[in-house]
Image (tube, rainbow, N blue to C red):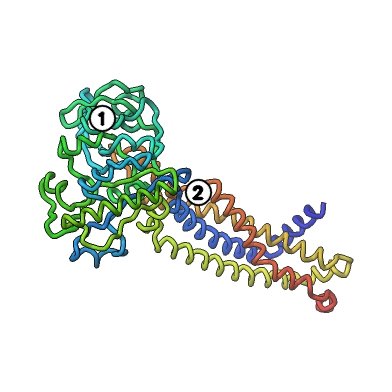
């Protein structure tokens, strides 16, 4: 009953001075709207894409740079080794039986010939990878399964395709056993990946960036050399005699282009594997390679993302600036609230004279500021939604052959989920209380006699 009475008094107060009320709501809305846009974007970039395996998955990096590697001055973290391996180093590490799973991979591409009217040949992204890719990264399969290890070395003409490509070629039906023509060669479909788009794309931060869609096709790693499949990602030649040229030159010299990951279930085996990696580079040093002091990295997913500055200092600075702007809005609201309460002080003095306690006065004013805060929060949420919508429109320009994953990624990176909405509601309440607690205390503390004399 008292709450209803306090809410009624708050509404009457709003009617007495609508201009100040609108200014307070606008100030809170502007602060919350800008804060929620930046925090939502930060939240999307700071995701944990495979949190349930963060302590089991490790990226491997070897420092095979020459002593005079010229790109170091352009690197933000010159102390880090290159984030990819050469073909021969990846294949050497792949032979270890210490990890539970090992994956070597890179991005390439093929031309798909649908073989039926109405569809012209089109390009598709291919992840050339090894058999452990699917169980290691918990890739969800809609139909079928991945291949086994022997299929990598043969290599067998099998592929796993993504859901979008399956929809395009086979109208979403179970395509296991069907064939797909890639650059004139037939490959048999053995599996279809369901919707899967880790954010960030932790397993390959070099090809399309940390926020990119998954590939359309997954192909056994043996086809890399059998078909001389060029890399669609970065290639970093790190020694003087390593030059980007023919495919054979790239895979036989110190040109880094292969991503390498392992899954290790225990700390003891992790120590054993790190020692194995160090021993490998020490042995290679005797053959004139790895001339620098040992600088290998076997790091978990969070460390890998941090090494690559996936979140970025710009995102952190934007969040800090948005919170500073919110604080300025709170201070402005505090001043407006104090002016409003002091302007209505005679009414408060009359209530005190009629028997209202100081506690009741403070409570009623706090209810009023919380209503202002909640209203400002709702308006701020609407402003944040419009701001995120504008960002989504500017970052995603649809094309005639676009994958639905591109739109889904743009939406995911600018989407305010339920946690962000709860956070916004909480921030609006806190903002209202912070802006109104001093004015409410000030007006509740004042002696009613001086206001009544003024009347």
Q: Residue at x 14, y 55 (%)?
A: 242
**Label 2: which secondary element:** loop
Residue bearing mark 2: 416
Image quarter of the C terminus? bottom right
Q: Position of residue 322 (x, y in %)?
A: 49, 64
Q: Is residue 243 left or right of residue 3?
A: left
Left or right position of 268 against 247: right
Report x, y in % for residue 333.
62, 67
Residue depicted at x 85% and y 77%: 449
| For residue 59, above or below residue 295 | above
Q: Quadrant of residue 237?
A: bottom left
State the residue in front, 330 or 15. Answer: 330
Image point (36%, 42%), residue name: 99
Residue 322 in view (yes/no): yes
Depth check: give the residue in front, 285 or 23. 285
Question: Which x, y percent locates residue 67?
Answer: 19, 65
Compare residues 107 and 92 and report the one nearer the observer.
Answer: 92
Whether residue 128 is situated above or below residue 156 in the rendered picture: below
User: From the viewer's perspective, is 398 left or right of 391?
Assistant: left
Q: Tell me where residue 375 appears, x and y as whole percent.
A: 63, 55
Q: Is residue 396 visible?
A: no
Reading the chain from its start, which is encountered first: label 2 or label 1? 1
Whole-number angstrom distance, CA of label 2 to CA of label 1: 43 Å
Q: Quadrant of residue 308?
A: bottom left
Viewer-closest of 209 and 171: 209
Local SS, label 1: helix
Q: To which residue does mark 1 refer?
A: 151
Which label sits in the foreground, 2 or 1? 1
- Residue 359 vs 211, above or below: the answer is below
């Amino acid at each position: 009953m008292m709450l209803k009475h306090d809410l009624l008094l708050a509404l009457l107060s709003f009617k007495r001075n609508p201009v100040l009320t609108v200014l307070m709501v606008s100030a809170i809305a502007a602060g919350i709207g800008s804060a929620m846009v930046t925090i939502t974007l930060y939240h999307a970039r700071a995701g944990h894409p495979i949190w349930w395996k963060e302590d089991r998955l490790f990226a491997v990096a070897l420092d095979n740079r020459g002593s005079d590697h010229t790109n170091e001055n352009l690197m933000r973290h010159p102390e880090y080794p290159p984030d990819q391996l050469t073909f021969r180093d990846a294949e050497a590490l792949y032979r270890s039986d210490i990890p539970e799973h090992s994956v070597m991979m890179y991005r390439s591409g093929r031309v798909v010939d649908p073989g039926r009217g109405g569809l012209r040949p089109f390009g598709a992204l291919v992840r050339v990878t090894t058999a452990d890719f699917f169980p290691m990264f918990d890739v969800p399969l809609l139909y079928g399964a991945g291949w086994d290890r022997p299929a990598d070395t043969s290599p067998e003409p099998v592929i796993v395709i993504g859901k979008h490509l399956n929809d395009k070629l086979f109208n979403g039906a179970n395509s296991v056993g069907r064939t797909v023509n890639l650059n004139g060669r037939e490959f048999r479909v053995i599996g279809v990946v369901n919707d899967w788009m880790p954010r960030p794309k932790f397993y390959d931060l070099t090809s399309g960036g940390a926020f990119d869609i998954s590939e359309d096709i997954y192909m056994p790693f043996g086809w890399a050399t059998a078909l001389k499949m060029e890399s669609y990602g970065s290639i970093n030649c790190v020694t003087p005699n390593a030059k980007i040229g023919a495919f054979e030159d790239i895979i036989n010299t110190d040109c880094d282009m292969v991503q390498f990951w392992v899954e290790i279930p225990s700390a003891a085996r992790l120590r054993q594997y790190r020692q194995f990696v160090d021993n490998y580079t020490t042995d290679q040093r005797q053959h004139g390679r790895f001339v620098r002091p040992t600088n290998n990295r076997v790091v978990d997913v969070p460390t890998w993302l941090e090494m690559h500055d996936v979140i970025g200092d710009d995102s952190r600075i934007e969040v800090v600036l948005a919170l500073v702007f919110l604080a300025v809005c709170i201070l402005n609201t505090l001043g407006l609230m104090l002016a409003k309460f002091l302007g209505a002080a005679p009414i408060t003095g009359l209530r005190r004279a009629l028997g209202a306690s100081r506690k009741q006065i403070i409570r009623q004013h706090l209810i009023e500021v919380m209503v202002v805060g909640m209203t400002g929060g709702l308006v701020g949420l609407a402003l944040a939604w419009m701001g995120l919508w504008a960002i989504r429109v500017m970052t995603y320009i649809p094309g005639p052959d676009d994958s639905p994953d591109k739109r889904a990624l743009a939406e995911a990176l600018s989407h305010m989920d339920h946690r962000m909405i709860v956070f916004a509601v909480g921030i609006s309440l806190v903002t209202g209380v912070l802006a109104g607690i001093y004015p409410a205390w000030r007006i509740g503390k004042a002696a009613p006699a001086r206001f009544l004399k003024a009347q």
